[in-house]
Image (cartoon, grey):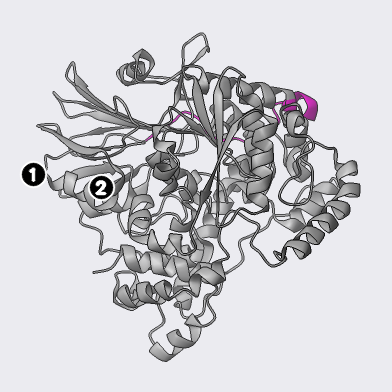
Amino acid sequence: MSDFLFSTRRRPPGALRDVLAACLGPVSAAIHEWHGGWGSLAVARAAHDAEVVRDDAGRVSVVLGEPLLHEPSSTPRAATAGPPRRALHALLADDGVAWDERVDGPFALLSVDTAGGRGRVVTDLFAWIPLYAAQAGGALLLGSHPDATADAAGARDAVDPVSAAEMVSYWTITHPHTLYQGVMQLPPGSERAFGPGGWEGDARTYWRPVERTGFPSPGDAAEALRVAFVHDVEAAVEPHATAGVLLSGGEDSRAVLGAIPPRVETRGFTFAEADNREVRSARRVARAYGAGHAFGLREHGKDLRDLPVVARMVGSQNHFLDVHSFGMHETLGLQALPIVLGGFSSDALLKADNVLPPAQRQIRRGQPPDPRPYRPQPVPGVREELLAAAHERRERFRLALRELRPESGDEWSRIYPFTMRKYAANHHGNRRLFRAHEPYMSNRVVKLAAEVPQAWKVDRRLFSAAFRPLLARSWYVPHTRNRFPYLPTPLNAALRPVLGAARRARALLTGTLRANQESWPIWEELAALPLMGEHAARYPLRDSAAGALLAESPDELAMAAEQWPALRRFVLLQLAYLTAP
């Protein structure tokens, strides 16, 4: 996916291009600019993107993402380089568009009338592709990259210490804030008009996740979910003879494999630091579905070596360590595939993974869950007043979302909009590296997730009922985590101890009892590498624009640093690197 940066006031040639190049140059095929009395536009085009910009008929428009276009008859068609993609640009000329019915999946749209300098921006249902805005010098700045937008607005040194403290303590920054003062996230599911001097009127919200039960029974919801999911996968691969799948040893991606029509030649891709249990399970799943399989070896320390490119690519809103595919997109040929499907966000939307354990226990007993406020997160070495302000900001957001979703607002405050999700950088990296498509992010799946009670989701109830037919071909392949996704819960309860004992015996016999069986590194081992110390010395947090979040005493900070877990140290390193002088 490409990125854009737009100013309602004309900028000198190269000014916006250089800002985008600093963040996205290494992952862009080209960066072009357009200028006129209406302002300036720069687009960093990804190698896999086609027709990102159209400049004709007195209008400049930008389409980010690979959404599916639905005709008024609701028949889905894939948005390719041909007429459907052009139709998305044409749609921006219309007023009152029902975007949630016409454009499906992650997208961000911009349109500017070159005669009058007026235009509009549109975000998708969840802000899967977030947009950012800032006012500077009498102009409105809009962009799809938070740090590039801040840079263009002259705000790269204006770090909000509360946002920095929030990133360190909660791993995300509460919507609509960003790391930078004066740079804000646009609301999801909205359309907003602007003119030469800035915004014109409030945003028009075309969809919100209002809490309601939209199905008479769990079985009806499961059937509707499976139909919506299969339709999305089929529509996405319809124009293509080949497809890739980001394949784990779990269940979400194997459901994707089960939905791909047999005529499509499919290849699964799995990344890990060794040919471990995760890779072996994924390989067996691929074989069960008649798909090819490629194993991408992630060398130990790769994440730290990739810091300069990946941290700038995803920006300061989410954690750079979650971009597992960087480098693999070239060595495994992902960037050359016409489409690569993933299984991201199933856990968040369909399995109630963000319902806290006490609330889950209440739901299992048939009780409405009690409110679960955010707990203050103490971080040694970080100014306590900043942590208190971050906690208050988070609580205000949670309470506001509970007005929209009285029973499930606590859960949704951790997943909606997408920048509230801890692991969002995974998607933001993939979409910039290859033509990624996430079926669990389709509009119908999202709307269904909003209309299904939490009680139907906990313990994988909804997921299992909906996707069991798609898992049938791999019924005998266990999950990486000691269960069989296809089998019912009672049978799994009986088999789990047996499977766990067998795997432990295998590990003893092969000398891999302490081996890492997951796809990501062991963070404490990664933080112990010499390169971590070299990065910390090269980018001292104290000297960066984010250094204001730290306690004043160097001795106190030194003692605190010894208590920071590895993941917190990585977040602090990312902040220091991105805000270095």
* Residue 56 picture quarter: top left
**Magenta stretch in the rendered image:** 203-222
Q: How many marks?
A: 2
Q: Residues within 10 Å of mark 1 (few under 14, many from 20)?
A: few
Indicate whether residue 208 is drawn in magenta.
Answer: yes
Disc number for residue 25: 2
Secondary structure predominantly adopted by residues drawn in magenta: loop
Q: Quadrant of the C terminus?
A: bottom left
Residue found 58% across the figure and 26% down from its top: 444
**Image vertical order of residue 560 relative to residue 263, above or below:** below
Q: Amino acid at mark 2?
A: Gly
Pick whichever, 234 or 441, lies toward us: 234
Q: Amino acid at mark 1?
A: Pro
**Image vertical order of residue 542 relative to residue 195, above or below:** below
From the top left corner, tell me how far across and down residue 475 is, in percent. Answer: 78, 34
From the top left corner, tell me how far across and down residue 524 is, in percent. Answer: 56, 71
Tell me how far mark 2 sits from mark 1, CA to CA.
19 Å
Indicate whether residue 351 is drawn in magenta.
Answer: no
Residue extending farthest to the top is: 73
Quick one: SS at disc 1? loop
From the top left corner, tell me how far across and down residue 266 is, in percent. Answer: 56, 28
Q: Residues within 10 Å of mark 2 (few under 14, many from 20)?
A: many
Disc number for residue 12: 1
Q: Earlier in the sequence, mark 2 or mark 1?
A: 1
Q: Quadrant of the N terminus?
A: top left
